[in-house]
Amino acid sequence: MKRHYRWKALEGAGLEHLTLETNALGARANGVVMGERGGQPYAFSYQVQVDERWRTRRVDIQSLDEGPSLSIEADGEGHWYQREGGAPLPLLTGCIDVDFAATPFSNALPLRRYPWQPGEVREFSMAYIAVPDLQLSAVPQRYRCLAPARRFLYDALFRDFQAELGVDDDGIVVSYPGLFQRLA
């Protein structure tokens, strides 16, 4: 199944177009994001591949200008490697999901992997990719289910940030107050 999503940034200028292809073996997300962070403009194309359990297996990010690029892969068990040369990335050990700061799509990864009950809370260690420099770090995040397949409270435990996310039946963000809004 192939679906298309678009978001606009609510802070500064920014847009995203995402094509998500799913099948019995997993999913592949192909996106283009343009925006600015801290007054610095960015534009990237990216691809995220997940397995059938929605564990991140591969991430490729390419600047659309002369900026940085990133290509990493994971075994689905919390071990990450550079795609070129296979060098391990011990900083990301234990991370199953990726959080690419430029897109609300990243939030779907932990949300889709589990069945959720109202009030249920889960914490995740995420392979965080900052923009515009694509610096990697492992960061703790927490999700609280407010209404299954509809609303989640997201806490970025590595900084003082919280947002109530509205999602669709597939766990894809519809509203991300202050940051993103999905377009019809």
Image (spheres, grey):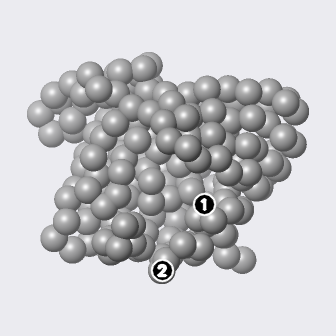
The percent position of residue 174, horizontal first and vertical second, equals: 71, 62
The percent position of residue 154, horizontal first and vertical second, equals: 66, 43
Extreme-front residue of the structure? 160
- Amino acid residing under circle 2: Ala
Is residue 23 in view? Answer: no
Q: Quadrant of residue 147?
A: top right
The percent position of residue 53, horizontal first and vertical second, equals: 59, 30
The percent position of residue 79, horizontal first and vertical second, equals: 34, 22
Q: Nearer the viewer, residue 167 or 19?
A: 167
Q: Quadrant of residue 6?
A: bottom right
* Residue placed under numbered mark 1 in the picture: 2
Identify the residue at horizontal 56%, vertical 57% (top origin).
104
Identify the residue at horizontal 65%, vertical 47% (top origin).
162
Q: Quadrant of the N terminus?
A: bottom right
Mark 2 or 1: the one toward you: 2
Q: Which mark is residue 89?
A: none
Q: Which mark is residue 13?
A: 2
- Amino acid residing under circle 1: Lys
Is residue 114 in view? Answer: yes
Q: Quadrant of the C terminus?
A: bottom right
Identify the residue at horizontal 68%, vertical 36% (top origin).
143
Q: Tag 1 or tag 2, which sits nearer the N-term?
A: 1
SS under mark 1: strand
Residue 99 is left or right of residue 107, and the answer is left
Q: Residues within 10 Å of mark 1 (few under 14, many from 20)?
A: few
Count the labels in the image.
Answer: 2
SS under mark 2: loop
Q: Nearer the viewer, residue 129 or 49?
A: 129
Q: Quadrant of residue 7?
A: bottom right
